[in-house]
Amino acid sequence: MFSQFPIFRSTYATMTRTEKRIAEYIAAHNKTIINETISDLALHTNSSEITISRFCKKLGFSGLQSLKITLAADIATAEDATYHTIRPEDTTDIIAARIFQNIMDGLQDTLKILDFSAIDRAADALIAARQILVFGFGNSATVCKDIETRFLRFGFLVHAYNDSHMQGTTSALAQKGDVIIAVSHKGATRELLENIKVAKKAGVTIIGITSYVHSPLAEISDIILSGMGREVHFCSEAVSSRLIHMAITDVLYMRIAMKQPDTYEENMTKMRAVIAQKRLPKT
């Protein structure tokens, strides 16, 4: 029902009964809702104008008009969905264009649903952490390694693990004050979830990065950072989601940097000085 509307897909499970009725009406009447007033919508959903207004604000919009603008853009994108499907007969330039468009659409979807207060909470948790453990498998392991490499610049004690046994060992030894960043596209990898649950029992803070806000990973995470990656139909791997998760961690990285700008600048100066010494002299 909500395939055209990422903002509804990510929040529907947490809506009240009345809010679900409003969302369902909008999805079912997406061609005519653009012309309806707040009074019309209240009448057709058996609710009040103030309820409609609160519904819009809960989704992050100033009012019904700004919600309708976003809905119109989502509908237009959905109508052009065939553009994102890669076929065996496609030429290289078409494949590149469709993959790039798919990534851009995923980033725009993510910007609509990303919980910015969760970014702030995650930044505070990481700054205060005794140590940071980063868990992920497959494509997500690439994101984990990127997190490890970048967050070392803050002087954090951070380690990325893509081996289940190493994840289990570090989870068993983790303690309150530690933070685990778990990265998973679908958020349903059994071994990852089992390892995280071990650490959670010890009081470890769990930050989940996933494409599915109602996934098992999201349910057990203390802080959830969710991004929507639109996958092309001819691609079995979550390519765009990997890049979207990296974009989320870039936002988190910069938020931490801005919370402690002096420390960040000092560390960057030290790092650049060491790297400069390893470069070949100019000829």
Image (spheres, rainbow, N blue to C red):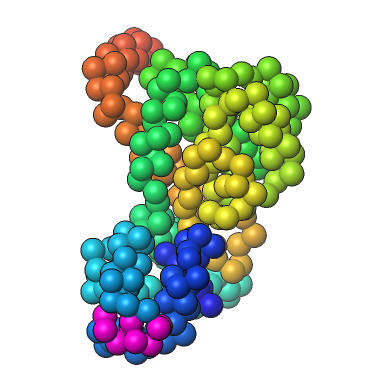
Secondary structure mostly seen in magenta is: helix
Q: Quick check: 109 left or right of 183?
A: left
In percent of the image, x 23 and y 63: which residue is there? 62
Magenta stretch: includes residue 43 = yes
Viewer-nearest residue: 68 or 17: 17
Q: Quick check: 126 left or right of 189?
A: left
* Visible residue check, residue 141: no
The spot of residue 194 in percent (x, y) is 73, 37
Magenta stretch: includes residue 39 = yes
**Is 265 located above or below residue 113 in the figure?**
above
The spot of residue 8 in percent (x, y) is 45, 67
Q: Quick check: 247 left or right of 88?
A: left
Magenta-drawn segment = 38-46
Q: Which of the 4 image quarters holds residue 266?
A: top left
Tally the numbered discs: 0
In percent of the image, x 55 and y 66: which residue is there? 232
The spot of residue 70 in percent (x, y) is 31, 70
Viewer-nearest residue: 110 or 50: 50
If the image is split into quadrants, where does the C terminus sit? top left
In percent of the image, x 50 and y 44: which residue is there? 224
Viewer-nearest residue: 76 or 9: 9
Viewer-nearest residue: 69 or 142: 69
* Visible residue check, residue 105: yes
